[in-house]
Amino acid sequence: MDKKKYSHFETNAIRTQVERSGQKEHSVPIFATSSFVFNNSEEARAMFAQELEGNIYSRYSNPNNDEFIKKLCLLEETEDGISTATGMAAIFHALIAFLRSGDHIISSRSLFGSTHQILTKILPRWGISHTYVDIDNNDAWQKAVMPQTKILLAETPSNPGLDLCDLEFLGKLALKNNLLFIVDNCFATPYLQNPVKFGAQLICHSATKFIDGQGRTLGGAILGSKDIITEVRSLTRQTGPSLSPFNSWILSKSLETLPVRMDKHCENAMILAEHLAKSEMVKTVKYPYLKSHPQYKLAKKQMSQGGGLVSFELDGGIKRCRKFIDSTKMLSITSNLGDTRTTITHPSTTTHSKLTQEEREAVGITDGLIRISVGLEHIDDIISDINQAIEKSAK
Ligand SMILES: Cc1ncc(COP(=O)(O)O)c(C=O)c1O
């Protein structure tokens, strides 16, 4: 990958582009091709032998994928990366590239439901174990290190609890114990937080969320140093979690507007969080940049804004939450997030329903918890829809 071209995030997000073809197009074309041609058989041999750089087959590389990933590397300040078809493909491959039978992972208990399933149901099939720790308990992270530990894994802010891990502490712990520190940076995006600056070595993204930002496509990315990514690439070239060129074209275009979208998501989310915090009908509100968030100081240190998600609890459990959700008129009832449209989710019966009640409660996913991904509609319309639905659900 090239060195950073411009000194500002916004400019790199817009001006990183595949070289123009002879057609002089302004917008990058979609390279909808499975394979690429060689000038002769010797060139084919040399490319397969990796003596020459170039595109061979879209499972390995494609100009659209390269543009998307090169941009993300600039934005996350990593040397190299791999685009993947989904965020889960990114997480799964980032883990298995470095794990062998008998290895051990330490992970924060607060995790997206499918990542939890990988740790608890899939990796144990190959004798890979894990220890869950409370995300904010630095002592517990330290005490969980064993001779067979290979990876520290965290999602910060977490889905849906919006809890944070101390990136700098975990970066140092990983360095001291020769562990790989993997961060799922999906909620913050590179615009709000660069985990590598605090010592994380591998960053995973679900590009499906704020990176696409319009709920159109799935996508993911694995980002890190050249050495680490080379190791992951030796796996993904064979297993093929490749992103389609069409989807990477969408995602690369989406990155052009990430900063302006995130500024507005954060502004709207902050206003909504402050509004809910004042409401007597709301039990608790969680938002990293609310002063009442238990890790407010840490959020200020490692995130430049609070993000686009707000979680809150209503009294009355599942019945009340269902009534509240069903009473909204504008908000979209869907499990996705990071969209221009405000979306509303009841994690305990949807995204985190595969966890046991005890597992959910350990990470604050009560039956009364609601997750809002605050969109880009006018904030007054978002608040008024939520207000009327809360009032209706209380009757
Ligand atoms: C924090 C987090 N990581 C990973 C994923 C998985 O991403 P994808 O749906 O793109 O596989 C999600 C999906 O909601 C998520 O919220």
Image: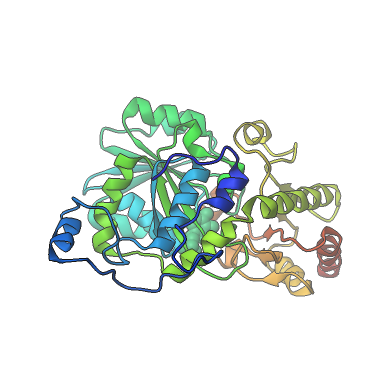
Q: Residue at x 22, y 66 (%)?
A: 38
* Residue 40 position in % (x across, y down): 17, 66
Name the residue at 26% across, 59% down.
237
Q: Residue at x 62, y 54 (%)?
A: 258
Residue 315 in view: yes
Residue 16 placed where, x, y %? Answer: 51, 51
Residue 133 or residue 377, whichever sits in front: 377
**Is residue 30 positioned above or below 220 on the image?**
below
Q: In this rendering, is residue 243 above or below 297?
A: below
Report the side of 283 relative to 144 (left or right): right
The foreground one among 230 and 42 is 42
Task: Determine the image quadrant of residue 381.
Answer: bottom right
Q: Position of residue 174 (x, y in %)?
A: 38, 31
Q: Quadrant of the N terminus?
A: top left
Instruction: Residue 33: give x, y in percent of width and height.
Output: 35, 73
Q: Quadrant of the C terminus?
A: bottom right
Q: Is residue 138 visible?
A: no
* Residue 213 shown left or right of residue 109 in the figure: right
Against 226, is 32 above or below? below
Q: How is the structure coloured here?
A: rainbow
Residue drawn at 62 percent across, 66 percent down: 214
In-front residue for pair 283/24: 24
Compare residues 83 and 16 and report the one nearer the observer.
Answer: 16
Image vertical order of residue 71 relative to residue 134, above or below? below
